[in-house]
Amino acid sequence: MNMHTKLTTMLITILITLLITAGCEQRPEDAGAEETQTPTQRQVEPEDQQQKDWQQQQDDMQKQQRDQQQQSDNPNSADAEYAEQLWTKIKDYENWTVPENFKGWQDGVSPHGKILKYYINDAAAEDLTQDGAIIVKENYSEKSEDALMAITIMEKRQGYDPETGDWFYVKYDPAGKVMTNPAGKKLAGLIGKGKSQGCIPCHAAAKGNDYLFMNDEKARTDRNDPNTTN
């Protein structure tokens, strides 16, 4: 074999080697870099998300059912919670207005204390029947500041319960804790509605269908006052 033939053979061998090497270095992921996931891999992620969404829906439904069951077991729970919030709003009621004709110690009747003291907020001072009006009665067993038994509240809440005049009732102990009846139900909200005893059936007897004995008492007192004209 002459020199020319040897050189030709070597060049051919080098070219073949380079071609083989280049082919080996071209990895499958380089050839299809734009498809980094297989079809199976692309399907897994949406399915996992659907599973998570479904589980979240189930958790939400179970929570809603628990809340509904709790409300069913204790139908006045929302009223009791509102009553607790209301106390923080009225706890300084002793600085409120004492209504005309109700100053100082007043005679009370059952189920209130034997002796009463009255306070009203600014809204009630303008109009006892307007939205936001609050009437406070301190219930005493006798004419002594140490004989305070309970604090009873009426609050006018527009739209709360039109059938009963939209009045919200609550009974607190002297420390501001919502009291309960003998059955353990908290005395807050529509107390006595649909029954023969309780706040609502009692106040329903007030004249003028306003559930307010204070208006009846004020009218009677004004009629007996020679300085008052009606």
Image: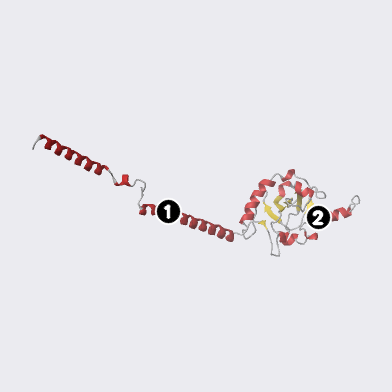
Query: Which quadrant, please, contains the C terminus?
Result: bottom right
Mark 2 packing: few (<14 Cα in 10 Å), some, or many (20+)? some
Picture colour scheme: secondary structure
Kindly state the secondary structure of the residue where label 1 is placed. Answer: helix
Q: Is residue 176 left or right of residue 24?
A: right
Q: Is residue 85 left or right of residue 47?
A: right
At label 1, the amino acid type is Pro
Mark 1 packing: few (<14 Cα in 10 Å), some, or many (20+)? few
User: Is the residue 199 above or below the residue 9 in the image?
Assistant: below
Return the x and y of residue 155 as percentages of the image width and height: 71, 52
Q: Residue at x 76, y 49 (%)?
A: 117
Residue 186 bears which disc, if any? Answer: none
Q: Residue at x 72, y 45 (%)?
A: 93
Query: Which quadrant, please, contains the N terminus?
Result: top left
At label 2, the amino acid type is Asn
**Nearer to the camera, 23 or 99:** 23
Q: Residue at x 72, y 49 (%)?
A: 147
**Nearer to the camera, 43 or 24:** 24
Q: Residue furthest left?
A: 1
Kindly state the secondary structure of the residue where label 2 is placed. Answer: helix
Quarter holding residue 190: bottom right
Residue 46 bears which disc, if any? Answer: 1
User: Is the residue 1 above or below the residue 28 in the image?
Assistant: above
Return the x and y of residue 111 as percentages of the image width and height: 72, 58
Q: Residue furthest top?
A: 3
- Tell me whether circle 2 and circle 1 mark residues in contact (CB < 8 Å): no
Return the x and y of residue 73 as percentages of the image width and height: 58, 60
Q: Residue at x 70, y 55 (%)?
A: 168
Q: Is residue 58 left or right of residue 17?
A: right
Residue 215 bears which disc, if any? Answer: 2
Mark 1 or mark 2, which is nearer the start of the sequence? 1
Return the x and y of residue 181 as percentages of the image width and height: 65, 58
